[in-house]
Image (cartoon, coloured by chain):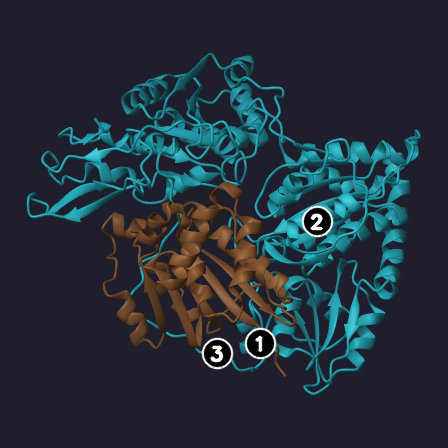
Amino acid sequence: MSNRRETKNIMIVGVGGQGSLLASKLLGYLLLHEGYDVKVSEVHGMSQRGGSVVTYVRYGDRVYSPVIDRGEADYIVSFELLEAARWLPYLREGGRIVTNTQQIDPMPVITGAAQYPADLVARMQAAGAQVDAIDCLALAEQAGSAKAVNVVLLGRLSHYFDIPDKAWQEALAALVPQKFLELNQKAFTLGKEA
Amino acid sequence: MKELMLGNKAVARGLYEAGVCFISSYPGTPSTEITEEAAKYPESEIYCEWAPNEKVAMEAAFGASLAGRRAFCAQKHVGLNVAADPLYTMSYTGVNAGLVIGVADDAGMHSSQNEQDSRHHAIAAKVPMLEPADSAEALDYAKRAYEISEEYDTPVLLKMCTRVAHSQSIVETGERTVPEKTYTKDIAKYVMMPGNAKKRHPFVEERTKKLIAYAETSGINRIEQGDGSTGLGIITASTSYQYVKEIFGDRVAILKLGMTNPLPVQMIRDFAAGVKRLIVVEELDPIIENHVRSLGLKVEGKELFPICDEFSQNLIAEALGEPVPAGKTLDVQIPGRPPVMCAGCPHRGLFYTLKKLDCTVLGDIGCYTLGAVAPLSSIEMTLCMGASIGAAHGFNKVLGEKAAHRTVAVLGDSTFMHSGMTGLANVAYNQSNATVIILDNSITGMTGHQQNPTTGFNLRGDPAGRIDLEALCRAMGFERVRVIDPYDLADCERVIREELDEDAPSVIISRRPCALLKHVKHKPPLTVSNDKCVGCKSCMKIGCPAISLKPSDKTKTGVLSCIDQTLCVGCGVCTQLCPVDAIHGKE
């Protein structure tokens, strides 16, 4: 028997500098405390300079590979719309994309060498993906800071998990500085109920 | 205690528990966090420093080992080339207290200029190499490496790769114990002149035989028999082991190698005898495979798996006829998102000027290598740390004065301290008319902000010695040393023109701290006046990620410039390009 059916896969994708680190940290903490074997994998260095970045979170009874491959992701959590579309081939059959609707032009679009594709949500749905697209930036600002986009996304993701809200709240409390906790709790709830 | 830990942090934890007292490293992705994490332990327990380069770091670690304290140095794969000189002879001298050398390969070249396989260094230097496959092994092998080092009197290479270094998995931590040794003078062992080295070489050969015995029996290499259902026997190590397990679980027999130099012999023969089809799964070069073949065994390897790039579970599955999940595809082209210089990056104005002056730009290793990317497209060569100056000298020598009047070498402050100084000595000594530009952003940027000898601070951020670049260049014989601010385009252009025109070598220091440094104060974001902007796209020539175009029927070109208020740091370089004065700060 292959191991891969027992392991669950979450990809966190976005643009270098968007704050995916807290998202993967929080998921890692949460899943470890839920008793899973966990691996979290990311790449540092050159690609962080405004490039496309990806973090892999895998959990199950026994996790081997640190990376998620094509057709394997149960969830793709995306900070930016184009990045959700870029990593779509990694989504498995029946998988779900939870994405921020924010659009950030990459350099080829800025210089006019390429165009930012239109109607990406509809296109991803047409390709067979379940897509949950929300304006996380607006919700984060409503919670009190544009920087809370990551926690809004996690709140939305939590909606699909069998893990009690209490465990998510504990992870949040463990990883967010006390003075920003209330803001982040609000952002989490706004995401969850969006 | 169980915790989720980054591979590099797990190495640092292993060093701590092994009683390491001294670490000297040069930063390099994906090795940097080992030293940074180790520096979070009290300085009274582990002294940690950034050395100017890997060779100096390794020699410092050797000195600490000689003195009787367990020592460590870390580098990326190409850094080990720089430190190869001490390594190959440390193999002869052996150690006093344990000495372990961390090296991190970058299959897939996430942040590197080549994809070399460090196992070649272990074989050539005749030193043992351990290769962990996850964080728990990273911690365990770091400790084990010290036992091997002291028992076999050898430096030990601890090889990481991007996917082990930058993945978090679960570890259990232990206590720290500090074994110490005393230093005793031993000329025959530590002075490697021919007469002594001749006696040490046979020792090295004997040591390798003993290490092969260790490889056979110590348990660092292990066999997982599996259920025998496929008849496959796979020899593998490091992250490749994880991909194989991911696909096959217990359906294959596995010889999992934790020590990849020297390799076992009898263990491999026994393993091969028990399987129907023997396969080696290893990233990069066919080193295990060639060893297995040299034993006269029938084996498959690189005819199934590529030498180039990193592996993944699907790659293994596909090569061995296992099912691979189909990914979904979109009916539209997704534009790439290559890395770019940050908004406010001080390098941008300089490369814009070099492009404007149509200079031949010989580049170097750092964030500024992005000066080769459109629209700046300025850098024409990048090879290795410090090569910009060395190459500019040779380039100008053969092409003469005409070339010298338009050729520049460009490198960062940290790269200059690493190995640019020796190149500069060559320019001073052998008299070429080179123009060298040091991009002094007061930090080692690419690897995530490490201090260096020019910044005035040490690894822990405490005040330290500071090398004065201007004084250093003057002392080396350069009479023409100029300092410019890369945010001031007119001054940049004037000074670079003057120095290119001059029939003398010169150093230009382009000084402005990295825009991402926390202490750098930024101006408010700039805005474009829609009434003034004519859509001429002049501001697009600098490739700033904060500037984009939006459609407009007001201009001939059909566009207006627009500045992202969350990205712009108000550096003002774009305002100097605007012919109609449309870009302004907030009133």
Give the residue drawn at x 20%, y 46%.
Answer: B549
Disc 1 residue crowd, few under 14, some 14–19, many 20+, Cα 10 Å: many
Name the mark on residue A4.
1
When the figure is inspected, residue B388 is found, relative to residue B308, above or below; the finding is above
Q: Mark 2 points at which residue?
A: B11
Q: Write down the chain letter for disc 2.
A: B
Tag 1 secondary structure: loop
Residue A15 in the image, given as x and y percentages of width and height: 39, 52
Q: In this view, does A116 lie above or below B277?
A: above
Mark 3 / mark 2, whichever is N-terminal:
2
Q: What's the colour of chain B in the image? A: cyan
Q: Position of residue B470 (x, y in %)?
A: 50, 16
Q: Mark 3 points at which residue?
A: B325
Residue B309 tag number: none
Colour chain A is painted in: brown
Q: Given the image, what chain letter belongs to the residue carrying mark 3?
A: B
